[in-house]
Amino acid sequence: MPPLKFLTLNTCTSISGLTNKRLPSLVSAGGLLFGPPLLIFLTTCTYLYQSSRPPFPFPNLPHDPPAPILNTVKLALSFYLPLSVLVGFMLGVHGGRLLGLLQHLRSGNPFDYKAERLRETVSHCKDYDVVMVQEIYKGYPFILDPDYPNLLHTEMKKVGFQHAAFAAPPQFPSVCMGTGLLILSKHPILSHSTLSFENQFLLESFGVNRGAMHARIQVPDQEEPLDVFTCHLSPSMREALMKDWPEALLAMGDRTRAGQFAEMKSFVERQRSSSTSMCVVGGDFNANIKHLEGGGVEEGIAYPAVKKAMVDGLGFEDAGWRVTYGYVPKDKVLTNPNHPDWCQVTEDLVFVDPATTSILEFDNVPLLASKAGRKAGYTHLSDHQGLGITVEPVRKRKGKASASSPRSRSRSRGPRKK
């Protein structure tokens, strides 16, 4: 069997109307399209009903006269206001989509070139056997959705990727996007499954499913199928947009992330064909390993949860730490280059089972736009870089130096600073 080549990449492709660069502001403002109007509607209806209510039907019994304003205020504060906040929170993503479309129509400024970037991404994938994709979303209502996962698969068929494992539809509590995962293969996919984590962070749970995906792939000259997993987990809220928020929310984020990794570990153990099958896991772990200007690496507080599940729990080997987020020169279409916390980090990782799978080559894959793309207005195909890895069965390397040796592994990671 010839070596197998894998690519994991985050395409930064949200649903129509949303752009990654302005996602938080669009979603926050989008909630205002639903919450306040609902509050005004319910309050107005209640006041009109209270004002027109007929006299009490039993005049001989003591009763209080109708108090429409007081009754309306009581209902608005005790029930209508919380309900409106919840509805606005749940539907903020849909409101953000609408606001994004309206801004586009008003200003004429282009979106973030989703379809164009996906079509151009194919040229970076053609030499691989299996591609693991994150952040390629499809969302409710499907009749209005451009179906970017299918668009990418259609384009990838042109370079030999005839087989695809699509993610399951969005699962509650999400009322919009699913996991955004996709596995494409040049070899037959025997079966696949999607896991939407039970542990979802409250502030993103109504808009998106965090989860994992598995595909069982039949490769040439192998009796056992190949097990491929991809995933997209919540970031550490202590190192993300909420790092200055109340401790209660940060602790909730910690518990959610720990729960997701526990589910990820169980999912791999449950879905894997056997302990002797080749196994590759690649995805966006939101590891947030910082690459310092002097050449060192700062592990930070997000990676230990990854290590606990994937290395300590499953016994898998971390292929290495490469820059996968933060381009130089900076991308200006998909991210905010002036963000005060901008730096080059490792968000995406690849793991293999060292008992069955040997690493031959591993490196990041910059996703830079072509000359035509730059002329159109975008310089990068994603805000992430891809990770490419070449593997083969362990038995073919018996007696040789393994890619998992300490010397090779330290070379792939570089110095660490905690």
Image (spheres, grey):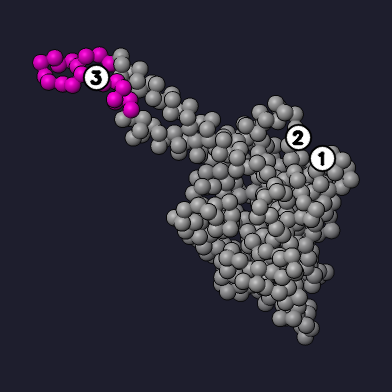
Q: Which residues are magenta?
A: 53-73
Mark 1 element type: loop
What residue do we see at 65% from left, 34% from top?
100
Screen quadrant of the C terminus: bottom right
Q: Earlier along the polypeptide chain: callout 1 or callout 3?
A: 3
At which x and y percent is residue 357?
72, 73
Crowd rating for badge 1 (residues with CA inside 10 Å; few <14, some 14–19, many 20+): some
Left or right, 32 with respect to 282, comes to left
> Three-letter amino acid code at disc 3?
Pro
At which x and y percent is residue 280?
69, 66
Marks 1/3: CA–CA distance? 63 Å
* Numbered badge on residue 132: none
Tell me, yes or no, whether the two marked residues, 2 and 1, touch with CB atoms within 8 Å. yes
Marks 2/1: CA–CA distance? 9 Å
Task: Give the total number of marks visible in the rendering.
Answer: 3
List the residue tagged with mark 2: 110
Q: Main secondary structure of the magenta part?
A: loop
Q: Earlier along the polypeptide chain: callout 2 or callout 3?
A: 3
Question: Residue 404's quadrant in the figure?
Answer: bottom right
Residue 14 or 253: which is nearer the viewer?
253
Residue 312 or 53: which is nearer the viewer?
53
List the residue tagged with mark 3: 66
From this viewpoint, which residue is outermost toward the bottom?
399
What residue do we see at 74% from left, 81% from top?
407
Crowd rating for badge 3 (residues with CA inside 10 Å; few <14, some 14–19, many 20+): some
Residue 294 or 142: which is nearer the viewer?
294
List the residue tagged with mark 1: 377
